[in-house]
Image (cartoon, grey):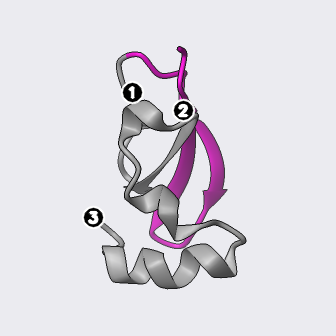
């Protein structure tokens, strides 16, 4: 995993995101952010939309997937 919880808790507010989203159950969320290595394929999560790339960094991708329900 390219980022740990303390790092996410630091960066989320700086990106305008609430850290409450880090502890929400996936089923209660409208969308998920997934960080992968550059060499990894886009994530596929059953019951969620196809992943859309939000940003690309030097060693990782940031994807968003949306809850289909």
Look at 51% across and 56% down and name the residue there.
Answer: 61
Where's residue 66, x and y in %? 57, 29
Give me the C-alpha separation between circle 2 and circle 1: 7 Å
Q: Residue furthest left?
A: 1
Mark 2 and mark 1 in contact? Answer it, CB < 8 Å.
yes
Where's residue 40, x and y in %? 36, 46
Q: Secondary structure at mark 2?
A: loop
- Span of residues in magenta: 47-69
Give me the C-alpha separation between circle 1 and circle 3: 16 Å
Residue 33 relative to residue 47: left or right? right
Residue 40 relative to residue 30: left or right? left
Q: Earlier in the sequence, mark 2 or mark 1?
A: 1
Q: Secondary structure at mark 1?
A: loop
Q: Is residue 23 magenta?
A: no
Where's residue 54, x and y in %? 66, 50
User: What label does residue 65 carry, if any?
Assistant: none
Q: Earlier in the sequence, mark 1 or mark 3?
A: 3
Q: Does residue 40 sit above or below 19 in this rendering? A: above
Q: Secondary structure at mark 3?
A: loop
**The quarter of the displayed image where residue 17 is located:** bottom right
**The quarter of the displayed image where residue 11 is located:** bottom right
User: What label does residue 51 carry, if any?
Assistant: 2
Would you name the residue on which mark 1 appears? 44
Q: Does residue 23 sit above or below 17 in this rendering? A: above
Would you name the residue on which mark 3 appears? 1
Q: Residue furthest right?
A: 16
Q: Is residue 65 magenta?
A: yes
Look at 45% across and 74% down and name the residue there.
Answer: 8
């Amino acid at each position: 995993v390219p980022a740990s919880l303390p790092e996410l808790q630091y960066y989320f507010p700086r990106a305008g995101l609430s850290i409450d989203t880090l502890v929400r159950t996936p089923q209660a969320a409208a969308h998920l952010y997934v960080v992968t290595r550059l060499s990894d394929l886009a994530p596929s999560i059953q019951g969620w939309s196809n992943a859309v790339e939000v940003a690309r960094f030097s060693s990782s991708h940031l994807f968003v997937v949306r809850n289909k329900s």
